[in-house]
Image (cartoon, helix red, strand yellow):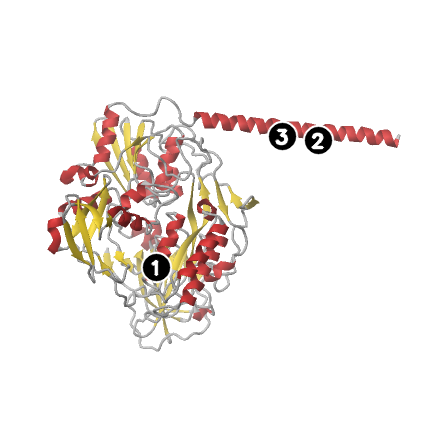
Amino acid sequence: MKHQKIALIFCVIISVISVDAQELLWPMAGKKAGENILYKPQAYIDNKQVFDQLFIGGEEGDIVLCPVDGMLSDINVSYMVTLDEYYSFDYDTKMTMDENIATAKLEEGIDRKNISIGIGIVTDKGHWAISGLKGDKRFRSGEKISAGDTLGIIGHSYRNIKEPSIVINTYDLAGKPKDPMTPFGLESSFVAFGELKRDNPMSEEKICEDLEVLKQAFIEIYPSLEAHTTKEEWSAYIDSLKTTITSPMNPSFEFRMLLQEILHKMNDSHLAMMPDPIVQEEQKKRFSSEILSLCDDTVRVAATTKKYEQYLWRIVTHINGESVMKYVEERKKMLSNYDEQVESTVQEALLLMQNVVKGKEAKEHILTFDDGTTATLPLLAKNEVIMNDKLAQMFKWRYRNRQTRETDFYETRELNDSTSYLGIKTFSIPDKQIEDIKQYLDTCKSNLIIDVRNNYGGENSALYKILSFLTDKPMSRQKGGYHRVSKKGRYDMLKYSANYPPDIELYSDYEQGENGCYKRDSIETLAIVMPDTAVNYCGKIYVLTNGSSFSAAMLLPSVLVRNRRGVSVGRETGSAYHRMACMDQTEIRLPNTLQTISIPMVQTVFDTTLCERVPMGRGLMPDYPMSLTFYEITDGGDGKTDVMLEYALKLIAEGRYLSETDPFEQSDREEEKSDWWWMIVGALVVAGVGGLGVLYERKRKGREG
């Protein structure tokens, strides 16, 4: 396999002028121009901005047409790793597209479903590239092709887009990307590289206009708003912020820091501020010469520049004469990647603190240590802190079980004669790897440690399958799960969306209810998990969790714990147990600053049970908690010990597992009584109404008689 960073046109060389803005044939057969655009220029896919690509979705089997007359150029079998990087494979002209896809030699972990054919089309006015194709066609470079000819059927253009899709690019003579939308007669979002402009600094009026757009977008779009505040309080908060904007702001620095504070008010791990679409404008920023670490209720110097290494790991009590905890509290205001009242994610984030300095007058940090001595460290124009051994151990701890390579989905180990280990690094797992996990679970020993630390989640379909391998009976004790949206139909604030058309009709299959519209789905909300028909692991399960166990990595231990099928070990999950907002993110681009906020449009409720075991607003609390200590984050001090894993092994050795009493039993019993009560009331009401009807009919007949 050739590993190349290549443009999707696959190195076509032409001697023609650039593509005209003529209206071309829409490539999806039977669809109108612009229908089912998934991502267009300026949108984001997994925090990466789309620049010159147009992603179009469809259903399995949809036919893809050639949009323009031309000549076929280089044809490749390709796999999109990122938005601008591809693995390419040789294309055999003697085989069909599907045969080429089926025979491509793949690295371990690459899902063949995401392999597709890319075709370049040279015209007399430019050239095009279409990828995401499959089918039984055979093509050769140099063949003529006409608009309306069938190119193939829709495949999967990009591994991070789950539905079938194609992707289109167009280029000029020099290979410069051009607008892929205008030629189809569409209103375009394409901006040529380097041409996106905005005022810097930006006036108070324009900053306040953007804050008003943000306010209204949250009110209309974000169904989880009232989990954090009321609409009235939210409006008052933003309005009060606007009164503090008394001078122009730098949109790429000062305004982004303000947005970070606003998002902190929500505490939602699925809300996100996207990368700045413009290269950061010139702005005088200063960085501290030190990185501080809060652990064991103590603040230490975790890193410095070369000049101040003598202060490493000293305990700090004050900065510039003020308690160091004030600095910690300021740092907390910049955190937003956790849910509601979750504490573990905050604790883990404060392990490394280095703020960009906002104050214009400050020139130095005067650190006071626990022995009363002081050190003066200057603020720097650029970040010059360097790595040290203990800091390297902390980074190693942060990345334990994290997916660092695209093909790295899970890890298995045999820890001892009675204990197996399954580290799940992501839940975006291809079918083949899920099948491999299934086969591994069929061979596991009597104790199984499942590690979902530092796992950012993924697909609920993969989660559901893995859960089905871990039980021999249905898991259904979780109650009342649902999806909720603010409304169905059109959303006015989508006129600011980078990834949704403004006139789209949404959520027609949801039912109107109190405070929004609802849908109940057993797969997505995991209302019931049925056992797999072939593999059912029945041993003891211990799940390792921490503050970076998000989304599906919260749901896996939650289903097991709720159904008394396993225990959790470690720390509270980063995502909240009862509800989270993890679906259908729309990217609202503020019109003046051009900053983009990804706002989830669906709130998912996993379980409505409230009891001491699962307090509202918190992540899944561990059955066997483990405090965050300096000893753990430095891997036992010697960089060799996985302290949490060793704790789980100790629990197994001591025979500690499920609690003697079921912490959910009382709340479930009360809920069952309540259900019976309402059933009795309902029956009485029905009987009463029926009796009244009979009585009324007798009286009516009596009067008539």
Residue in the image at 19% along x and 60% along y: 380
Q: Is residue 16 above or below residue 380?
A: below
Give how far across and how far down residue 195 sits, in percent: 35, 71
The mark closer to the camera, 1 or 3, is 1
Question: Do the numbered discs 1 and 3 sit on residues whose CB atoms are within 8 Å?
Answer: no
Which residue in the structure is indicated by mark 2? 689
Q: Nearer the viewer, residue 161 or 700?
A: 700
User: Of the residues under marks 2 and 3, which one precedes in the sequence?
Assistant: 3
Nearer to us of marks 1 and 2 is: 1
Dot 3, how many residues are within 10 Å of its Cα: few (below 14), some (14-19), or many (20+)?
few
State the residue at coordinates (84%, 30%). 701
Give the numbered dot on residue 682.
3
- Residue 205 visible (yes or no): yes
Q: Quick check: 541 left or right of 476?
A: left
Residue type at mark 2: give it: Val
Q: Earlier in the sequence, mark 1 or mark 2?
A: 1
Measured in 3D between alpha carbons, the distance from the residue under mark 1 to the one under mark 2, in whole angstroms, is 61 Å
Residue 75 % position (x, y): 32, 63
The answer to which of 470 and 109 lies nearer the viewer is 470
For badge 1, the amino acid type reads Arg
Q: Amino acid at mark 3?
A: Gly
Residue 304 pos. (x, y %): 16, 52
Q: Are marks 1 and 2 in contact (CB under 8 Å)?
A: no
